[in-house]
Image: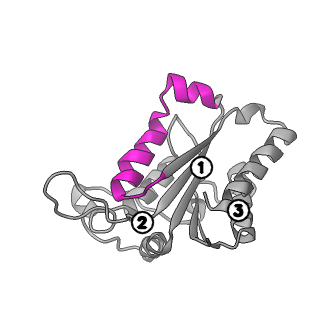
Amino acid sequence: MAKRVLLINGHPDPRSSTFIGALADAYAAGAKTGGHEVRRLDIGALDIDFLHSAAEFTEAPRDAAMKAAQDDISWAQHVVFIFPLWLAAPPAKLKAFLEQTFRYGFALPKESKGFPRGLLGGRSARVIATMGMPGLIYRLWFGAAGLRALESGVLRLSGFSPVRRTILGGMGAMNPEIAAKHIKAVADLGRQAL
């Protein structure tokens, strides 16, 4: 069954020549081959301001690009985040994007009794993260804490289910064969909209 897919390239570098850019291109191409409709946001190309108060988090974004991003998230049935891990977590610009878009009134109710029910149910997500260290070390030694915060503290809390992850480690030692293998695997995920 065809899905509406929003692909978010979370690399803060606006150049499309990054490996993250190549992975995003591969996912998008795979999804289109699979008959899915794809929209794409490139975080590096957006001018994203940081939130400065708790009060701001309860207001609708004033920036037109952030409002458009919320429209894209609302449109999507499946949202894919592809980004490098920096200091064991998503880059700050991606975090600023999440704060701007996943606000109260959009992702979470402004008021709720008890545990809040996310407002973005009916959507699935995939998190694809690259890192210099081996992925196994990140999962075992660090407990994948930076990814768990995004997956549980943002996506699942907002109603996304299921939330799946792909960790691509050892980027510093990557050779062309391994890069091609990763690109093919991500294209296959796109084809299935997983």
68 relative to 58, above or below:
below
Indicate which label's residue lies in the foreground, 1 or 2: 2
Residue to which mark 1 is pinned? 83
Q: What numbered label is drawn on residue 122? A: 2
In the shown orientation, is residue 28 left or right of residue 52?
A: right
Q: Position of residue 96 (x, y in %)?
A: 43, 55
Q: Residues within 10 Å of mark 3 (few under 14, many from 20)?
A: many
Q: How crowded is mark 2: few (under 14 residues within 10 Å), some or many (20 or more)?
A: few
Asked if residue 15 can be seen in this view, the reply is no
Disc 3 marks which amino acid? Arg
Q: Does the magenta stretch include residue 171?
A: no
Displayed quadrant of residue 136: top right
- Cα separation between marks 1 and 2: 24 Å
Sooner in the amino-acid sequence: mark 1 or mark 2: 1
Sooner in the amino-acid sequence: mark 1 or mark 3: 1
Residue to which mark 3 is pinned? 191
Disc 2 marks which amino acid? Gly
Q: How crowded is mark 1: few (under 14 residues within 10 Å), some or many (20 or more)?
A: many
Q: In which quarter of the image is the N terminus?
A: bottom right
- Cα separation between marks 3 and 2: 20 Å
Label 1 close to label 2 by CB (< 8 Å): no
- Can you name the residue that lies furthest to the right here? 177
Q: Quadrant of the C terminus?
A: bottom right
